[in-house]
Amino acid sequence: MIELKNVCFTYHEESTLKNVSFHIGKGEFVALIGSNGAGKSTLTKLMNGLLKPSSGTVTVMGMDTKKTKSSVLARHIGFLFQNPDRQICKNTVAEEIRFGLEQVLQDKTLIEQRVNSIIEQFGFDPSANPFQLSRGERQQLALASVIAAEPEILVLDEPTTGLDYGECTKIMSFIQQLNNQGITVIMVCHDMEIVLDFAGRILVLSEGRLIADGDTRDIFRQEETLKQASVLPPQIAQLALRLESGFEKVFTAEEMAVALAEKTRPQFFSREGRDSHERFSGLCAG
Ligand SMILES: Nc1ncnc2c1ncn2[C@@H]1O[C@H](COP(=O)(O)OP(=O)(O)O)[C@@H](O)[C@H]1O
Ligand SMILES: [Mg+2]
């Protein structure tokens, strides 16, 4: 779906992205992590064609972004900016969603159907003024406008930053549902608990270089890589890393509970326990 080959990008003098290559397949849920200034937002803008590589190629669904108009790419890729206010420009919720759809669709009836359906899904008041909504509600509106167009790929730059727990859960459950339907998701995220819960794969960016690319749980056990990217793994995973053997597959509170129960099972199941049990059985038999 998305392929980057030896991509470099420079805003002014110093290069912001250095020789980045990866391939993302259909239906994947990929998290992009790294410290502030690592180049994550720049990378998302290269994926949707807002920026073009200084060298190397970015291919989206077979289209080279250098040779394809942003408006054409926009039909396939939905993009949520880091700040929802950069996206919102109309006076009511319904107008905002309609405006987004008009950029990619022509059929007026279809547009109205989509507007009404997405408003119902999110439970919005269609006549509300976007700028009087809370930050969380504006974020939801920005996301709604993006997904109303039914893109095959969603690129989300920090979709949950600044949201409370309830708002965050609501947004993430929408994103999860879309991914379950086969939509490819690429999400920049600073919350490693969310990354663990939702992403199957992680790309780690440090100073413009891709320093790791792999399965979420494998990456969360690579302490050196995470340190280099100034990222801390989820809390339970950090604790598990400090513990002895038997905790290698522990990343969540539930898994920790199971692993601890396993460790504290009655002696009977331990080597010594088994030996004494065998001796005891032997005595009885004798
Ligand atoms: N429009 C811009 N013009 C010049 N430099 C920029 C611009 N946007 C970002 N940068 C620089 O590029 C680097 C990467 O920024 P960014 O992609 O926003 O990182 P991240 O999203 O990981 O925090 C930073 O050093 C930042 O200052
Ligand atoms: Mg950013």
Image (cartoon, rainbow, N blue to C red):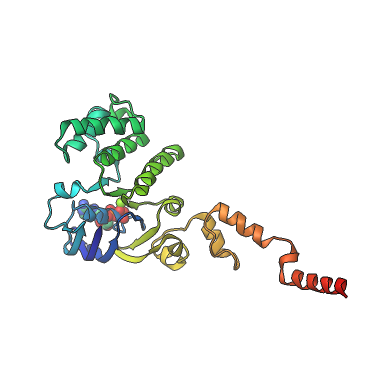
Is 26 left, or right, of 217 in this rendering? Answer: left
Q: Quadrant of residue 265?
A: bottom right
Q: Quadrant of residue 175?
A: top left
Q: Quadrant of residue 53?
A: bottom left
Q: If the image is split into quadrants, where does the C terminus sit?
A: bottom right
Q: Position of residue 207 (x, y in %)?
A: 31, 63
Compared to 92, does 232 lie above or below?
below
Q: Position of residue 112 (x, y in %)?
A: 22, 30
Residue 160 visible in this rendered orientation of the protein = no
Compared to 55, does 85 lie above or below?
above
- Nearer to us in this view, 227 or 75: 75
Splitting the image into four quadrants, where does ligand 1 fall? bottom left
Q: Position of residue 252 (x, y in %)?
A: 53, 54
Residue 111 visible in this rendered orientation of the protein = yes
- Nearer to us in this view, 70 or 276: 276
Compared to 99, does 260 lie above or below?
below
Is 183 left, or right, of 241 in this rendering? Answer: left
